[in-house]
Amino acid sequence: MNRTLRLLVNACVLLPALALAQGASAPTADKPAVTFDEVERGFYFAVQAGPSFVLNPPAAADTPRPLSPGQTAQVEMGVDIGEFLRFGVFVSGSANRAGAEYEGFSGRRASGDFSMLTPGASLRVMFLGLKDAQDVQRSWFYLRGGAGYALFSPKQLLPDPDILVFAGPGFEYYTRLRHFSVGIEVTGTYLVSSGAMGFALTPSLRYAF
């Protein structure tokens, strides 16, 4: 009886030790580490806004074309094509002031301020990236160009649409929030039919999905 009891006690002591040893010898697979891109690229949504100027607004021959200051804003959606290219479609709007002497194509039936709504497309080329202290290229210089279909208001002042082309340099910084970048752009504009030229200075904010 004592021998049987002793065997049982020994078994109770040895079994947990054997189980622990067996568990320690079994290989355990490590979970792969989760990594994130320092700079997110892909589909994006961007907004930009700032002052704009039309140097010689559309107008009939031999009528005043005064400098017209104003504001512009743009909403863009698109996709990054690798690290250096970005294609987007946009809708922009602008409102410009003009004095009573500005008559556009109204034949003196209207005068003054005008606005423009332009849907279009653009292509951006990143040509110089600068690395930060962590060896990440967060700062980029780029060139952006595009075209759109400009619609004017009021119609009595500027009845006919025009083709708007634009181009200019810019700077973009990819923040440490990964999905967000901020920038600033200088854009020269040209209305093909009327020969009106202008420029805009627009800070921007972008979110990449």
Image (spheres, helix red, strand yellow):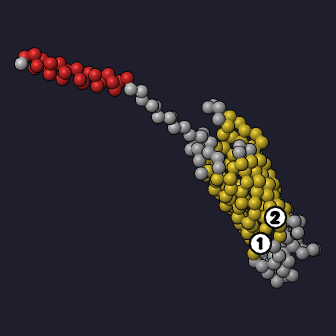
Q: Residue at x 87, y 65 (%)?
A: 192
- The residue at 73%/66% (across/down) is 119
Residue located 66% across and 44% down the image: 173
- The amino acid type found where label 1 is placed reads Leu
Q: Residues within 10 Å of mark 2 (few under 14, many from 20)?
A: many
Between 204 and 106, the residue placed more toward the observer is 204
User: Label for residue 34?
Assistant: none
Can you identify the residue that label 2 sits on? 164
Q: Which residue lies furthest to the top in this view?
A: 3
Towards the viewer: 118 or 20: 20
Question: How far from the left and from the top, in percent, is residue 174?
Answer: 64, 43
Q: Which residue occupies 90% across, 75% down?
A: 60
Q: Position of residue 135 (x, y in %)?
A: 65, 32
The extreme left residue here reads: 1
With respect to residue 35, does 209 lie above or below? below
Q: What residue type is labelled 2?
A: Leu
- In the rendered structure, the answer to whether residue 18 lies left or right of residue 78 reads left
Horizontal and vertical percent position of residue 185 = 74, 51
User: Is 79 left or right of 178, judged from the image as shown?
Assistant: right
On the image, the x and y values in percent for residue 171 come to 72, 46
Q: What element carries label 1?
A: strand
Task: Tell me which label, 2 or 1, sits earlier in the chain.
Answer: 1
- Structural distance between the alpha carbons of marks 2 and 1: 10 Å
Q: Mark number for residue 151?
A: 1
